[in-house]
Image (cartoon, grey):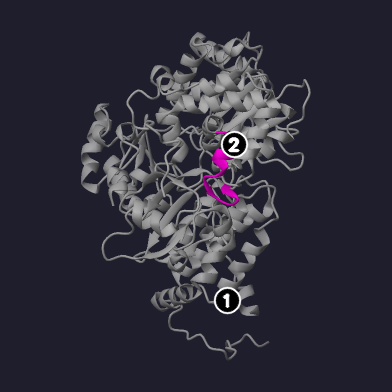
């Protein structure tokens, strides 16, 4: 054992994350010379009127305005494409919260993006029920078909609650399935053209009761 | 036996509008409920024997009776997060018949005298949340939501709150934190939500299906409803069947129906030439059952006696073309991703279980790893604030017990394939490594 322990480790060969550490974490270290971000002043923070009124309408629904943080972040995301630092600052100003607080909330939830992503969100369910019916192949096919198109954001997602149409994907919020592998090119073309994705296979048109089930 | 209460006319076009719903007798029960005393309502719910349909199976009437009397601000929250893998019954109810849920919420809110209510729906259900929003506008316009509803002196404020993608927000206290605008971390219990829930007020929190059943119970009468199903499992249940079956989908059954009839009769069983290898009876969190258990009655007690649970009523069937290790790994990866990280056993346990299952696949594992993995599961169960960790530990532990031989075969086959390790035979004799003695 001693021989193994005394082998020198070449630091250049150790796998490191972008921020230089061997453990994952934030890519940018906190600047300790800066003061912590405080609640931005609404008077000096420029907030677009529609965004402000949308967030204020959400805040009015709850006894505690903090409850509106997820809806507010959705409004930010809808406006800017992702939760941009400026957008978060604006929401924080309207809600009287610190931007750091809203970032902590946004980082918890899968549907809120803290990095720029393509405008077409394609969530492919890769959980058990879908993967038993070929979801992993579908995910690979969609990734390949999307290629490096900057408008496409294809990601695997946890169970989307539509195992009856497995394998399925949520395309900008619309549930579509079951998607056969040979439908992927059509689907991609429809998404790129901004058309309804595979209209016949959308969940909104599916009947609940399967007459065959009760016939047998 | 199938019996249709919740899915009555479910595919009728326009049932999601208030006109069609009222033509079908909708909101009559809410109107009648507001003419009764809250205690009478709770007694009816108790008599019905309805157990919560979200997963834990706690009796609704009992839960409602725990809400303290008094004039403090009380809340009703509908858990529409439905994040348990394999479950999609609430989605169907909300999409096709949103007013039934709203009616159920009015009844429940009046029973516990809560004047504020929220429907917490998962963010992925965009279509269903939009439908609920529209239904709420209709109900508000009709005077069924808002001030002094149905001409009584009871007021109810109801809103839809959309989540943003987190399994843990289906756990009731995680949901409450998320609804308060925080990260969805579960809270220590007690205090239970019935005493200190949303904004520290007494809160009744129930699943969509449970609340949507309350108008049905009022219509039938508690005692009549209790006659459906079997002892300790009253009523009908929506079940979601998915995985390797020919007709995946939602079905309404009377509790106690044989599991074989559900999987083969309703859902058509696995494809031609395939057989059932194992199945999850109540969502991915329930311990797995095998083909030997197919004749079990589908009700709370029978499944508990077999060492599993009814859970959310989601049956996932896995046929013999799938390796148990692959399913276990998928499962563990899901729970690792969804663990909120608050409690160490769950955060670390889910992570290490994934690592160990990956070792099995890459051929680095030995049969001893199975024992370590089983002990990790034991150390998760019951040691966390919520049951997310248990939800991984229970099925994985049951797979290791029931399919140990297959795990061992898989380990050996992968080891043989591994160019670095396949050459070294596993032996009971201690292996001497040159230079290691001193």
x, y percent for residue A74 = 50, 25
The residue identified by callout 1 is B368
Q: Is residue B363 above or below residue B254?
A: below
Q: Is residue B416 above or below residue B171?
A: below
Residue furthest to the right in view is: B70
Query: Neighbour class for label 1 at 10 Å: few (<14), some, many (≥20)?
Result: few
Q: Quadrant of residue A206?
A: top left
User: In which chain is the residue bearing label 1?
Assistant: B
Residue B222 falls inside the magenta stretch: yes
From the image, tell me which residue sits under label 2: B222
Viewer-side label of 2, 1: 2
Residue visible at 46% across and 26% down in the picture: B98
Query: Quick check: can you spot residue A55?
Result: yes
Q: Which mark is residue B309?
A: none
User: Which percent across, then down, holds residue B220?
Assistant: 53, 33
Q: Which residues are magenta?
A: B221-233
Instruction: Let me know if marks 2 and 1 both belong to one chain.
Output: yes
| Residue A99 visible at all | no
Query: Which residue extends farthest bottom?
Result: B429
Secondary structure type for disc 2: helix
If you read the primary sequence from the N terminus, does the residue marked by circle 2 or circle 1 appear first? 2
Residue at 47% over, 65% down: B293
Q: Position of residue B184 (x, y in %)?
A: 62, 37
Residue A60 part of the magenta segment: no
Number of numbered tags placed on the structure image: 2
């Amino acid at each position: 054992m001693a021989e193994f322990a005394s082998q020198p480790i070449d630091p250049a060969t150790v796998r490191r994350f972008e921020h230089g550490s061997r453990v994952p974490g934030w890519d940018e270290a906190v600047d300790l010379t800066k003061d912590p971000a405080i609640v931005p002043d609404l008077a000096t923070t420029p907030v677009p009127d529609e965004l402000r009124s949308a967030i204020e309408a959400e805040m009015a629904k709850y006894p505690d305005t903090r409850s509106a943080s997820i809806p507010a972040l959705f409004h930010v995301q809808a406006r800017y494409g992702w939760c941009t630092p400026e957008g978060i600052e604006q929401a924080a100003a309207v809600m009287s919260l610190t931007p750091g607080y809203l970032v902590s909330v946004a980082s918890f939830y899968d549907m809120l993006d803290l990095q720029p992503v393509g405008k077409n969100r394609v969530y492919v369910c890769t959980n058990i029920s879908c993967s038993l019916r070929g979801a992993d192949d579908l995910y690979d096919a969609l990734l390949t078909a999307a290629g490096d198109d900057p408008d496409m954001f294809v990601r695997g997602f946890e169970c989307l609650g539509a195992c009856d149409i497995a394998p399925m994907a949520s395309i900008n919020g619309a549930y579509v399935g079951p998607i056969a592998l040979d439908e992927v090119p059509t689907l991609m073309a429809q998404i790129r053209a901004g058309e309804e994705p595979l209209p016949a296979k959308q969940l909104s048109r599916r009947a609940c009761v399967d007459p065959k089930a009760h016939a047998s | 036996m199938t019996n249709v209460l919740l899915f009555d006319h479910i595919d009728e076009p326009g049932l999601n509008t208030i006109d069609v719903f009222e033509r079908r007798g909708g909101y009559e029960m809410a109107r009648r409920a507001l003419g009764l005393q809250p205690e009478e309502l709770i007694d009816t719910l108790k008599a019905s024997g309805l157990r919560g349909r979200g997963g834990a199976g706690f009796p609704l009437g009992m839960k409602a009776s725990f809400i303290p009397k008094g004039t403090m601000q009380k809340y009703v929250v509908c858990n529409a997060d439905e994040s348990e893998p394999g479950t999609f019954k609430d989605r169907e109810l909300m999409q096709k018949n949103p007013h039934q849920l709203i009616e159920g919420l009015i009844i429940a809110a009046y029973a516990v005298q809560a004047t504020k209510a929220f429907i917490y729906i998962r963010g992925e259900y965009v279509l269903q949340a939009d439908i609920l929003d529209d239904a709420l506008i209709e109900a508000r316009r009709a005077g069924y939501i808002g001030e002094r509803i149905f001409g009584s002196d009871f007021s109810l404020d109801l809103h839809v709150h959309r989540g943003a993608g987190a399994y843990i927000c289906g756990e009731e206290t995680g949901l409450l934190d998320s609804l308060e605008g925080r990260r969805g971390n579960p809270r220590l219990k007690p205090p239970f939500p019935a005493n200190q829930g949303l904004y520290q007020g007494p809160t009744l929190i129930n699943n969509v299906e449970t609340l949507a059943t309350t108008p049905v119970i009022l219509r039938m009468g508690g005692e009549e409803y209790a006659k459906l199903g079997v002892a300790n499992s009253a009523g009908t249940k929506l079940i979601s069947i998915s995985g390797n079956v020919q007709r995946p989908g939602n079905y309404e059954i009377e509790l106690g129906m044989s599991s074989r009839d559900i999987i083969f009769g309703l859902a058509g069983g696995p494809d031609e030439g395939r057989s059932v290898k194992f199945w999850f009876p109540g969502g991915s969190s329930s311990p797995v059952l095998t083909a030997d258990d197919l004749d079990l009655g589908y009700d709370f007690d029978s499944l508990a006696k077999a060492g599993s649970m009814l859970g959310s009523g989601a049956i996932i069937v896995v046929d013999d073309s799938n390796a148990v290790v692959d399913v276990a790994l998928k499962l563990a990866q899901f729970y690792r991703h969804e663990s909120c990280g608050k409690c160490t056993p769950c955060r670390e346990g889910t992570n290490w279980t994934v690592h160990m299952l990956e070792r099995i696949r890459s051929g680095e594992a030995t049969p001893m790893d199975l024992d370590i993995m089983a002990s990790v599961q034991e150390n998760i169960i019951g040691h966390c604030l919520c049951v997310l960790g248990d939800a991984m530990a229970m099925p994985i532990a049951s797979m290791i017990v029931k399919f140990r031989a297959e795990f061992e075969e898989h380990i050996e086959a992968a080891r043989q394939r591994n160019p670095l390790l396949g050459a070294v035979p596993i032996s009971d004799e201690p292996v001497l490594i040159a230079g290691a003695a001193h």
